[in-house]
Amino acid sequence: MLSDIEIAQSATLQKIATITHKLHINVDDLIPYGHHIAKLSTNCIQNLQHKVDGKLILVTAISPTPAGEGKTTTTIGLADALNQVLAGRDEHAVVCMREPSLGPVFGLKGGATGGGYSQVVPMEDVNLHFTGDFHAISSANNLLAALIDNHIYQGNALNIDPASVTWRRCMDMNDRALRDITLNSRNKDGHAYVRQTGFDITVASEVMAIFCLASSLKDLQARLANIQIGLSTTQQPILARDLQAEGAMTALLKNAFQPTMVQTLEHTAALVHGGPFANIAHGCNSVIATKAALKLADYVVTEAGFGADLGAEKFIDIKCRKTGLQPAAVVLVATVRALKYHGGVEVADLNQENLAALQAGMINLQKHVQNLQQHFGLHVVVAINHFATDTDAEITLLQTETENLGVKALVCKHWGQGGAGAKDLAMEVLNVTAHTSDTFKFLYPDELPLLQKIETIAQKIYGASHVELSSIAQKSLLALEKDYGHYPVCIAKTQYSFSSDPTLRGAPVGHVLKVRELRLSRGAEFVVAICGDIMTMPGLPKLPASERIGVSQAGTITGLN
């Protein structure tokens, strides 16, 4: 079997104008970045507004494991399969997904353009610099940081309390050395001051969240203006607009804000735009890309990061709540290998048949299905991402147990076969989306206090007994509840467990969700609850993926996955 990058590099890509022509996009409405990448112009987005929306299909997954689940691969494979099934009907499906971050690309996880024969291409461009969107987001974030320190240096007319400044710098790379830094500065008169700060990875920044939730350039600028960077010496909020930062920040983001179109290996159109992590941010691609996709196609397949307890919950309680979007169906990705891991089997032994471990690990899938059905009122289809080591007995057991939940589980072989390997899944998704219902709901109402929102997620979605706030988080809660109690909450926690302890597999119950910090994202309009040991600036592993990546004398990138 060829590697992912070898498959991608051997593919014959169509010109991007050919891809967009199928969706009736005028070539003059494209802003080309070479032959195979283009942004949709603002004019194009505006001209789509009169069209009827297609149906939105959300792809999520069980809790991630070292065995891998293949959520992005399934997202792409399903869209390709839908287009095969829809051929001749004058109906189309498109993919709508996030841009990869360089942190995982050079770290442990690798790229995020799918795998095998279900990939978005050109994969090297998408995984690396792409159209420079992340650079623009980092630059806008760091411009605001520079303006804050410059304002203090130039005399501090706003009376910013340096110790209260919460705005952090960012970069799109895993670098644990930058988590905590000390700024030693002087003002214009030579008076020294020291303040503690640090860097976040770009995908965790509030600018990224704003970028992905804004509905227009006007909305983007208004949200950027509303960013709270700290307090004055009299404890009054200081906003980005007080520094007159929002205009320049928007200027940096103007081109990046236009959604980017690429294609899959089977020439399905793919909008790839924005990229917040789901363990430390809200984990969904941009609103503007999703809404454009719904105007362009009859079916839009999108994904939410990591397990359904994180990405799907935030997709619904943050993205859908803010935009009016509503999934017509949810695909929950699982593998036999991952479920055996949740049943107690170590990675080295996952290739061996183990029905007892699979049965034990099913509790993780069951909890995710129940959450999606009971708490969000969604119609669920399970995609069994097939591995060659899966046995017939294991597949039968998984399907039987899933059917006991009233949900169909379809075996998918898109990694090795492309869209043809996911046709059964596509047919079931079409069957589910053909029947409309009004069962969709949010987990909690806007008016619920912040702490009760956190408790509701912890107890209903995670199975926790209660929530425990640090003294710092308690102090923040008192300050936030008065003015921002109506905001949704964005839980930042490990992706590897329902709990905040990454070692707890399956579906643990009775655990305590420990909240160590609360952060206000005033421009994004949510409150972040940072739990356990989760870091907003990840570190590289002992053997980073970067060690395998290189460039041949012919200029071909190697080792990227």
Image (tube, rainbow, N blue to C red):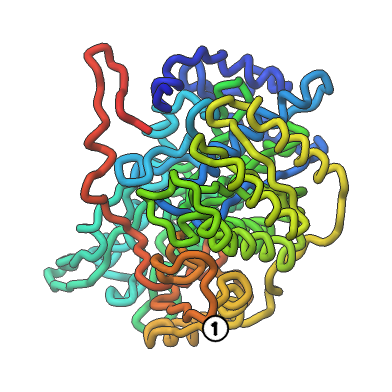
Residue 442 located left or right of residue 538:
right
Q: Residue at x 45, y 39 (%)?
A: 112
Query: In the depicted view, which residue is nearer to us: 253 or 18?
Result: 18
Q: Is residue 558 above or below residue 339?
A: above
Image quarter in which the C terminus is found: top left
Q: Residue at x 50, y 52 (%)?
A: 354
Residue 531's image quarter? bottom left
Can the viewer see residue 280?
Answer: no
Q: Residue at x 21, y 50 (%)?
A: 542
Q: Residue at x 65, y 39 (%)?
A: 411
Q: Is residue 75 above or below residue 66?
A: above
Query: In the depicted view, which residue is nearer to us: 454 or 343?
Result: 343
Residue designated by label 1: 465
Q: Where does residue 528 sit, x and y in percent of width and height?
A: 48, 69
Query: In the depicted view, which residue is nearer to us: 160 or 545?
Result: 545
Residue 369 located left or right of residue 241:
right
- Regarding mark 1 in the picture, which secondary structure is present there? loop
Residue 267 located left or right of residue 239:
right
Residue 196 located left or right of residue 105:
left
